[in-house]
Image (cartoon, grey):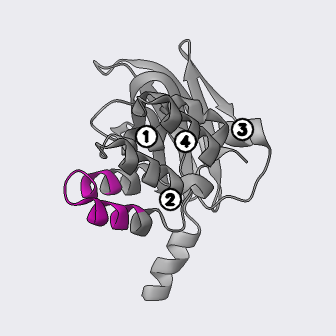
Amino acid sequence: MFWCLLASLAVAGNIHIDAKSPVLVKLDGDYVRQDPAARIVIDSLDPGKYRIEICNLVGNTMAFADVSVKFDEEVYYKYAEKRLERVQDHVTEVLGAQDFAPAMQDAEFRNLMRKTLKGSLTKKLKQVVKRTAGYSVDIRQMDELLTSFHKREERLQVCALLRKSVRDAHNAAALNHHFGVETDREKMIKLFER
C-alpha cells in the first residue's frame, strides 16, 4: 500500500493560475478554495481531463477552460481581461529553463505561514528552513512571508536563508516596502543578485 501511495504522488499533476486580482476558482464545478486569491495552485491531480472556471467574488463564472493534465505535468494559466489563457510558467518565460526545486504549493505555503505567525525568531527561522527544504519560492510568497517578521534584521535573515530558492529573484524590488531604511533595501537587493 505504501508503494501505491508513493506511485500516486509521483504521477500527480498541477495546474497554476495567476490573476491580476483575487478570484475564486472551480475545478469540475467545485471550489478549489473558499477564499479568493490572485495565485492558485491546484495540486496532486490524477492524469485526466478537467474543467477550470474563474469566478468573481459572488460566484459568477467569468471564464473557463478545459485542460488535460498528464503524468507529473505542470500546467500554467493566466487570467486577465475576462480571458483565461494557457501560458508558459512566468518564471521560465522570463529566465528560461533553470534548475530550480519544485515550486512550493499553496497548501505547504499556508502551513509555513501558520507556523511563523508567532514564536521566537529562532523557532520561526527553523520553520522556514524545515518547510521550504526541497522547494523553490517566488517573490510573491516571500512578500507574504516577510509579514511574519517584524524587525528589519529578521527580514534580512529570511531573505538570506531563501535567496537561492527564489525563482524570480529579478523581482526582488517588490520587497522594498519591507525595508524602510535604504541601506537595508540595498542589502536585500544585493542578496538576490545572480
Label 3: which residue? 88
Left or right position of 108 against 168: left
Local crowd size for mark 2, using a 10 Å CA cut-off: few (<14), some (14–19), many (≥20): some
Q: Nearer the viewer, residue 136 or 102?
A: 136
Residue 127: give x, y in percent of width and height.
Answer: 34, 64
Q: Are marks 1 and 4 in contact (CB under 8 Å)?
A: no
Instruction: Name the residue rendered at 33%, 30% in the picture.
Output: 36
> Which portion, as a residue range, is magenta?
112-128
Q: Nearer the viewer, residue 189 or 164?
A: 189
| Magenta span contains residue 102 | no
Left or right position of 146 against 92: left
Type of amino acid under label 2: Leu
Q: Earlier in the sequence, mark 1 or mark 2?
A: 1
Q: Foreground mark, 3 or 4?
A: 4
Q: Earlier in the sequence, mark 2 or mark 4?
A: 2
Type of amino acid under label 4: Met
Label 1: which residue? 28
Q: Foreground mark, 1 or 2?
A: 2
- Whether residue 32 appears in this view of the structure is no
Type of amino acid under label 1: Asp
| Magenta span contains residue 113 | yes
Looking at the picture, does residue 95 appear above or below residue 25?
below
Instruction: Name the residue rendered at 27%, 66% in the picture.
Output: 123
On-image quarter of the N terminus: bottom left
Circle 2: element type:
helix
Farthest residue to the left: give it: 118
Q: Earlier in the sequence, mark 2 or mark 3?
A: 3
Type of amino acid under label 3: Gln
Circle 4: element type:
helix
